[in-house]
């Protein structure tokens, strides 16, 4: 028996209708109203008879068709959708329902947040419901964009079970395949069937100033880091006469080396990603892993510098051997970052959740919040280092800057304290602005972060500490 259907019509030009849905989607008892409507339409599509037919209205399109083999067809009002199903082994009936105005009906609720505003994120394509009589493991959609000024597309489906049954957008099983700028088409691929669409952000920070600041700053930083390592090689013997000085210089070398390698990886990542295009998962994942790892190494060696300062300030009359300190330092300085980096990639690599989907090789934020695997350890170390610095300064001032230590030890402790006092606020402030870039599109914050981040090794510690080390090295050499 053929079932005649009159699809629901939502007039997107009627502002009162839009306001009504906004009210329903935010009400305590009516938040799931739009989700219930969509679910009812999906269930209706499953009840249709096994006949081929289509219904078109001004705001919706329903198609019931039998598919056998590969399938590639334009869909929707004015053919705003392309659907690609690679292979269906046996003849199977599919129901496709396209809603061109459901971007005003469904809220922008995502798996991790019930806030319908989502900082300006909006549904930027038709909503299409797909129902099949068999399991479909691979289906692609090419969406025409409603608003061409929006960026950063997220391929999503409506999950009716999210947020305690209220429903929301979920990206599990879907990934962005391509973004064609010249045709304004976004292609998504999913491994299941339900209701799909795309979410996009209004922010656009394609500002040439940011790129120039970053690339010039990182280039200067790399040159400074190379100079730092050369100076360390020259003055190494004259500046590592006691255990405290030795460990201090080991820390400085590892901080400089890790930041230099991270900068090199940054340039490699920039070379494999085109601005405004989908990031290649393989090369970008490798680059992101090493950038993440070496940035963490930087912070953990800063942490070790603070621990050394605390240890040598408190344990005046006793101390562990140099070899034991080195073993502990390298285990923590490289072992902990490696563990964090491996756990991060293992837990988020599936479904393109490890790296950003567009523009850069760096940890994902929108989908899996993988970036927290860097932000949390880094800022935790910043807080701990500041606390250590307060304790050490109190101890040193109370007993006259290490009255029981040798002059060389005193000098080393003072320099370490100065090192920690300069580097910790600098890196902490830098990544504080980095967190700000996650939640706002304000150009000023992005410029400040780009400047501080690209010039980290040149902001005080190279210009000040390197000169001090050179002078001390020449002084010791002359005394010999």
Image: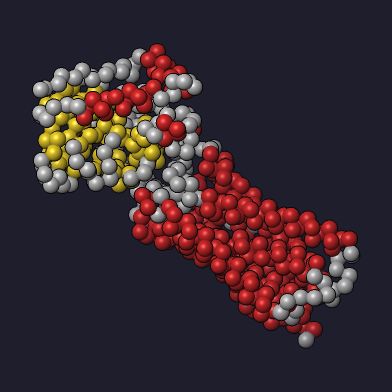
Foreground pick, 357 / 472: 357
Residue 265 visible in the shown view: yes
263 shown above or below 452: below
Name which quarter of the figure residue 61 lies in: top left
Residue 373: image x %, image y %? Answer: 53, 53
Image quadrant holding the N terminus, namely: top left
Foreground pick, 96 / 202: 96
Residue at 42 percent across and 29 percent down: it is 166
The residue lying furthest to the bottom in this view is 480
Residue 259 visible in the shown view: no
440 shown above or below 226: above
Name which quarter of the figure residue 468 lies in: bottom right
Image quadrant holding the C terminus, namely: bottom right
Residue at 56 percent across and 47 percent down: it is 434
In the displayed structure image, the side of residue 206 where residue 385 appears, left or right: right
Residue at 15 percent across and 47 percent down: it is 87
Residue 106: image x %, image y %? Answer: 37, 26
In the displayed structure image, the side of residue 128 where residue 210 appears, left or right: right
Foreground pick, 165 / 353: 165
Residue 370: image x %, image y %? Answer: 48, 50
The colouring scheme, among rainbow, by chain, secondary structure or one colour, is secondary structure
In the displayed structure image, the side of residue 223 where residue 118 appears, left or right: left
């Amino acid at each position: 028996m053929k079932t005649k259907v009159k699809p629901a019509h939502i007039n997107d030009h009627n502002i009162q209708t839009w306001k009504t849905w906004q009210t329903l989607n935010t009400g305590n008892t009516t938040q799931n109203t739009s989700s219930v409507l969509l679910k009812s339409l999906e269930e209706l599509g499953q009840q249709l008879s096994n006949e081929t037919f289509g219904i078109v209205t001004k705001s919706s399109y329903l198609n019931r068709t039998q598919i056998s083999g590969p399938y590639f067809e334009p869909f929707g009002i004015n053919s705003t959708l392309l659907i690609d199903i690679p292979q269906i082994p046996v003849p199977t009936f599919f129901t496709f329902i396209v809603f061109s105005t459901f971007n005003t009906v469904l809220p922008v609720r995502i798996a991790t947040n019930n806030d319908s505003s989502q900082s300006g994120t909006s549904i930027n394509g038709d909503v299409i419901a797909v129902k099949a009589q068999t399991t479909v493991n691979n289906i692609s959609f090419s969406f025409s964009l409603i608003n061409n000024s929006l960026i950063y597309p997220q391929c999503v489906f409506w999950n009716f079970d999210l947020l305690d049954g209220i429903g929301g957008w979920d990206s599990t099983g879907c990934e962005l395949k391509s973004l064609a700028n010249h045709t304004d088409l976004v292609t998504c691929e999913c491994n299941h069937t339900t209701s799909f669409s795309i979410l996009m952000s209004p922010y656009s920070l394609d500002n040439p100033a940011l790129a120039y600041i970053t690339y010039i700053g990182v280039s200067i930083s790399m040159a400074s880091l190379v100079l730092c390592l050369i100076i360390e090689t020259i003055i190494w013997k004259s500046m590592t006469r006691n255990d405290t000085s030795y460990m201090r210089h080991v820390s400085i070398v590892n901080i400089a080396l890790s930041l230099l390698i991270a900068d090199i990886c940054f340039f490699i990542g920039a070379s494999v990603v085109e601005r405004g295009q989908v990031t290649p998962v393989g090369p970008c994942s490798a680059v992101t892993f090493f950038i993440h790892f070496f940035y963490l190494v930087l912070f953990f060696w800063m942490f070790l510098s603070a621990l050394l300062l605390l240890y040598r300030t408190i344990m005046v009359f006793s101390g562990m051997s140099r070899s034991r300190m080195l073993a502990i330092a390298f285990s923590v300085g490289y072992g902990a970052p490696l563990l964090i980096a491996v756990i991060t990639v293992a837990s988020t690599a599936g479904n393109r959740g490890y790296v950003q989907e567009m523009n850069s090789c760096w940890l994902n934020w929108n989908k899996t919040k993988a970036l927290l695997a860097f932000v949390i350890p880094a800022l935790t170390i910043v807080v701990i280092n500041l606390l250590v610095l307060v304790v050490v300064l109190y101890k040193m001032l109370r007993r006259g800057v290490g009255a029981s230590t040798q002059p060389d030890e005193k000098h080393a402790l003072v320099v370490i304290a100065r090192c920690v006092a300069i580097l910790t606020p600098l890196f902490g402030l830098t990544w504080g602005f980095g967190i700000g870039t996650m939640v706002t599109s304000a150009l000023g914050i992005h410029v400040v972060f780009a400047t501080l981040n690209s010039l980290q090794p040149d902001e005080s510690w190279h210009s000040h500490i390197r000169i001090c080390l050179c002078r001390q090295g020449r002084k010791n050499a002359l005394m010999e």
